[in-house]
């Protein structure tokens, strides 16, 4: 099955700085890569996603980049704010529209 | 107001009891999913249903059961056979089969006393 690794497991940044979270995957035919934000005690919320035919996607302060050759994709958050503090999960859908696999999560702390 | 609802938010159970967690969606989504989340860990798939009256085991189905009699409902029963049921349970749905974009409910925290 698909193997997804997410790094780092924890990340602390000063308010206003950028944060980058990276995920690697094993199935070269994987075709869909969503990112979720989970606040304490709540369900994950989709914040951005990218499909395999696109290299980069932006939504205001959030961007995702995909490198299919290297089989990794990254979440970039610019101008971080305290409300960005949460756990972020990446996910991968392998080729053949198979079961989505989630990363183990990154706990982001934005220090005011 | 469309979305996914899970009830109850908190649930306490004595050892040896079965308990059913509710998941309802009014998004007209075909597929629904149940995940388990343990502290500091990712999401593990329990069961999923791509269409009404059909469901499949996920990675950790032992000790759990589900039904999918209606498109909008996918209840999860945690049976007494589940050895370590204390966890945060998340329900999700997606508009199409094929593991498309999943949207999550608020979760139910189950504690076994």
Image (cartoon, coloured by chain):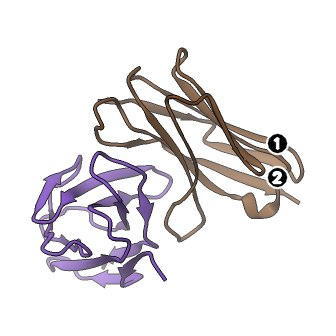
Chain colours: A brown, B purple
Q: Which chain letter matches label 2?
A: A
Where in the figure is residue A30, as x and y percent of width and height?
Answer: 40, 29
The correct choice, above or below, for A36 with respect to A3 in the image is below
Quadrant where the C terminus of chain B sits is bottom left
Where in the figure is residue B32, as x and y percent of width and height?
Answer: 28, 62
Q: Which residue is mark 2?
A: A80
The correct choice, above or below, for A91 with respect to B53 in the image is above
Q: Which mark is residue A18?
A: 1
Q: Is residue B31 left or right of residue B26?
A: left
**Within 10 Å of the Cα at label 2, are there few (<14), some (14-19), or many (20+) other Cα atoms?**
many
Q: Are marks 1 and 2 in contact (CB under 8 Å)?
A: yes
Given residues B47 and A46, the one toward you in this image is A46
For the point 53% across and 20% down, the residue is A68
On whether disc 1 and disc 2 are found on a single subunit, the reply is yes
Count of numbered badges drawn on the protein: 2
Q: Quick one: label 1 or label 2, which is nearer the N terminus? A: 1
**Within 10 Å of the Cα at label 1, are there few (<14), some (14-19), or many (20+) other Cα atoms?**
some
């Amino acid at each position: 099955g698909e193997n997804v690794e997410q790094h780092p497991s924890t990340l602390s940044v000063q308010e206003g700085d950028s944060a980058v979270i990276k995920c690697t995957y094993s199935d070269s035919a994987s075709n869909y890569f969503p990112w979720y934000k989970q606040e304490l005690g709540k369900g994950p919320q989709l914040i951005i996603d990218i499909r395999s035919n696109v290299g980069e996607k932006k939504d205001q302060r959030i961007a995702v980049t995909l490198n299919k050759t290297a089989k990794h994709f990254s979440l970039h958050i610019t101008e971080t704010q305290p409300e960005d503090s949460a756990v972020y999960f990446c996910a991968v859908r392998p080729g053949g529209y198979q079961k989505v696999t989630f990363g183990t999560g990154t706990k982001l702390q934005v220090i005011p | 107001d469309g979305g996914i609802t899970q009830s109850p938010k908190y649930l306490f159970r004595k050892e040896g009891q079965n308990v059913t967690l509710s998941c309802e969606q009014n998004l007209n989504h075909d597929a629904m999913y149940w995940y388990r989340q343990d502290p500091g860990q990712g999401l593990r798939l329990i069961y999923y249903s791509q269409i009404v009256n059909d469901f499949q085991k996920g990675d950790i189905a032992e000790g759990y059961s589900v039904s999918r009699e209606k498109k909008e409902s996918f209840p999860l029963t945690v049976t007494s056979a589940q050895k370590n049921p204390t966890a945060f349970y998340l329900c999700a749905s997606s508009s199409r089969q094929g593991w498309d974009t999943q949207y999550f409910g608020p979760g139910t925290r189950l504690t076994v006393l």
